[in-house]
Amino acid sequence: MSSLSRDDVANLARLARIEMTDQELENLTTEFGVILNAVARVQEVATTDVAATSHPLALTNIFRTDVVIPSLTPEEALSGAPASEDQRFRVPQILGEEA
Amino acid sequence: MIKNSAAEMAQSLASGTITSVALTQAHLDRIAEVDGKVHAFLHVDTQGALKQAADVDAARARGEKLGPLAGVPLALKDVLVQKDVPTTCGSKILEGWRPPYDSTVVSKLKGAGVVILGKTNMDEFAMGSSTENSAYGPTHNPWDLTRIPGGSGGGSSAALAAFEAPLAIGTDTGGSIRQPAAVTGTVGVKPTYGGVSRYGLVAFSSSLDQAGPCARTVLDTALLHEVIAGHDPKDSTSINAPVPQVVAAAKSGDVKGMKIGVVKELNGDGYQAGVRQRFEESLELLAQAGAEIVEVSAPNFEYALAAYYLIAPSECSSNLARFDAMRYGLRVGDTDGASAESVMNMTREVGFGREVKRRILLGTYALSSGYYDAYYGSAQKVRTLITQDFNNAFAKCDVMVSPTCPTTAFKIGEKANDPLAMYLNDIATIPVNMAGIGGMSLPCGVASEDGLPVGFQIMSPVMQDQRMYSVGAALEAALLSKWGAPLLSQAPSLGGAA
């Protein structure tokens, strides 16, 4: 379980939306073998009787009254956009070509 | 003047012996003189800082009531957004981005009249222990320019040690305030999780990230702590309770009758001899100051590092999904007919560095179906065990202590190709983040074998941050009377007028 093949790493890169070179995939496959062996140690003490902690605080939903408060103008919100059009973010094609 | 403490500078400003504009200019001059060697800053906001300083001087001239640090300059880690000032997080993916809003930390600094000199270098998205993972090149340790200044907040710690700023802001996810403080002979505090707002702090690992104050003295750190701390409705994980009285604690430095718990597991094998020697001496000084030294055990701390390198990458793989080339930051490969997915893939390949990619993929794996329970789920259970260890130990003592780091500053490049060796730097600092408690590092001398600074770590229970300031101030006072001058007076001058 603590080792990954090059194909496994390539699949993770695809899931994480990172195009990777062959060299990067080779390096990561080697490094993951070492890192996963080290981190798998958590399984030694993580027995079924131990509860999981996801966060240091006991989180509860925070609500506020639904009132209008000052916010960014459209120009400010779009100020860092790689491309924009008609007060909207312009993005590359999301769906495949129409048949 | 630039070698004074922030408290002394504030006093000179209040008494009118210096203006904020002059003080700010003196620091800008120092930056111009030495930052070519140190590379603490990614961006120096000369105009903005001088304007802010002039505003404080004008307000003072009008007789307005000003905060205790009004007019004193500060270096800001480049992971906190400041309106219209470039914020990169040490990454190419955010190169040139100017945020349209202020983080709460920045709003509070501006409100208190603290002058922001510029943005400091850091490991990309705060992932690292050496600042070598910055896409803009490493920062150099002012004690020895061939060595690392710690990380991820190496720019902030180096700026303090090089007298480029008397105050700095850092963020600490696994030690990124405390470890840089330790290896540069400066002071850094990770407040209780939720003690300082995360609004406008670019997220790496949301359940661990915490912004905090950095300075050259315990009192300066406390003064800055009170400026930035407090409840913020814009951060749903911000604690709605009074800020611990850290300035009062730093001023009194009273440890009489306090029980100081030495963590058995954070000492011994793997800790450099000179680090252990300075640590043991510090315990003696605290005992002489009236504290009772006891030993406490935290048997699950040995699993903290493994759990951290599952939890932090898991949260980062989710948090960094926002860098998708659509709304801000870099966009690569947006040619006619290119799909959004291919643009994302190419942008993230070009925009992220090696360590960030490594962690995103590790987190993607730890969270993936079939492996979730074995990795992320198990790590969360270890988090419970570590919190229990702290609770058990704090039943027997008021604060816990350890060396901040196993070693002094290592050479730039020495561990760059060995991720596991690099991760070991944080072995003593990570448990604090896992439990969400407070942690401080302050200098306790130089190691005899290499003459480099050693950090002393103090840990205090949730929202009892004042305790670590009491202990820190007591130790600092005892060490100062032993040395006769602050530790940083032993650091090389780096040239320049100071």
Image (cartoon, rainbow, N blue to C red):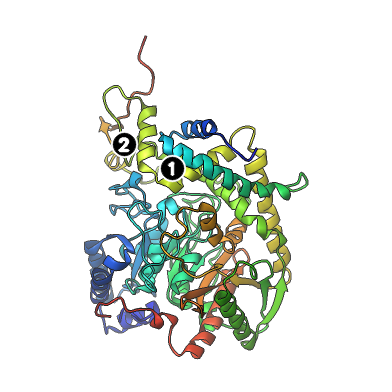
Question: How far from the left and from the top, in percent, is residue B100?
Answer: 31, 48
Residue B368 placement, left or right of B53: right
User: Is there CB contact under 8 Å for labels 2 and 1?
Assistant: no
Question: How far from the left and from the top, in percent, is residue B395?
Answer: 73, 68
**Quarter occupied by residue B365:** top right
| B261 up-or-down from B239: above or below | below
Q: Which residue is denoted by mark 1 in the rendering?
A: A67
Q: Say which of B391 and B136 sits in front.
A: B136
Q: How many neighbours does mark 2 have within 10 angstroms: few (below 14), some (14-19), or many (20 or more)?
A: many
Quadrant occupied by the N terminus of chain B: bottom left
Residue B1 placement, left or right of B464: left
Residue A66 in sight in this render: no
| B394 up-or-down from B348: above or below | below
Residue A80 in sight in this render: yes
Residue pushed farthest top? A99
Which residue type does callout 2 highlight? Arg
Quadrant occupied by the C terminus of chain B: bottom left
Question: How far from the left and from the top, in percent, is residue B452?
Answer: 46, 75
Tell me which residue sits at (67%, 40%) in the image: B374
Tell me the CA gap for discs 2 and 1.
35 Å
Q: Which residue is denoted by mark 2 in the rendering?
A: B331
Q: Secondary structure at mark 1?
A: loop
Frontmost of labels 2 and 1 is: 2
Q: Say which of B281 and B83 sits in front.
A: B281
